[in-house]
Image (cartoon, rainbow, N blue to C red):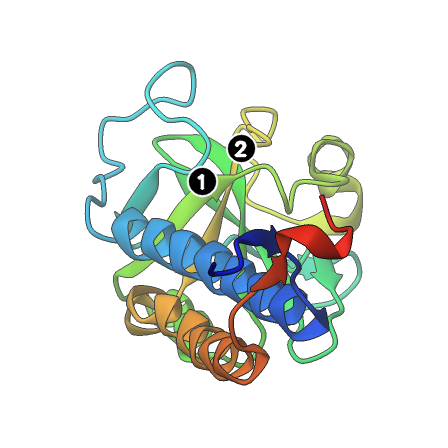
Amino acid sequence: MADSYIRKFSPNRRHYIAAALFLAALVLFAVGIHRAVRTMWRIDPRGLTFEGSVSENDSVLLSADPLRGALKGAETETEICYHTYLGFMTDINCYIIAINGTYCPVAVVRGSQEEADLFAGEYVTGYFTYKYSDGFAKYMDNITQVWELDSYHDYSQYDELGIRLVNVKRERISFLWGIPFLFLGLIFLKKAGTPYFYYPEDNGFE
């Protein structure tokens, strides 16, 4: 009479590594798709107001000159960078732009093509976010004490909902970062073999 067997699910370490790699790939694919889609339906800021017209993660296509000024006692004007976020690979500079009379922060990678395009008045792509707004309200409340600015502008009209400028081409292929994790997961899964083992029913395994 043929022995009967019981199937047991018993993954080894390689199965767990493969599962972690697949999960990482899934997350990177999802984030990449979100970033790509976010750059495809870009709104034109003309006519927008911050109260109700825009919200966080809305994408935007704009051309705006960063606010320029000269430090008190100086004569040379420059783009006002109110804060710099230092990163491991890149630094983020935060400038100030006006959208329909309302000032808001705009964040961009230092030394990037997007920063150069912003300074040149070219059209740039970004998305609305509060991520780079730390200290912006306090800065705007005291900006005329530090900078020589045009007196006929109302600098009290500002909003902390800022814009993060991005590289459109890079955003639209960012999902590709998930592919190496997917391939590594497949390699570990192949080497791990089947996660099921079969034991004879009469050997004490129930």
Q: Please say if the residues under marks 1 and 2 sit with CB atoms less than 8 Å apart.
A: yes
Spot occupied by residue 133 in the image (x, y as percentages of width and height): 66, 40
Q: Residue at x 36, y 26 (%)?
A: 54
- Residue type beneath disc 2: Leu
Q: Residue at x 40, y 79 (%)?
A: 113
Give the labeled residue for mark 1: 128
Q: Residues within 10 Å of mark 1 (few under 14, many from 20)?
A: some
Q: Tell which of 198 and 116 is nearer to you.
A: 198
Residue located 74% across and 57% down the image: 203
In whole angstroms, how far apart are the C-alphas of marks 1 and 2? 6 Å
- Nearer-N-terminus badge (1/2): 1
Whether residue 77 is visible here, answered yes or no, is no
Q: Nearer the viewer, residue 91 or 116?
A: 91
Name the residue rendered at 63%, 51% in the picture: 201
Locate the C terminus by quadrant: top right
Asked which secondary structure carries label 1, the reply is strand
Quarter of the figure with residue 98:
top left
- On the picture, is 200 further left or further right than 121? right
Q: Secondary structure at mark 2?
A: loop
Measured as percent of width and height from the top left, residue 149 is found at: 60, 47
Left or right: 80 with respect to 3? right
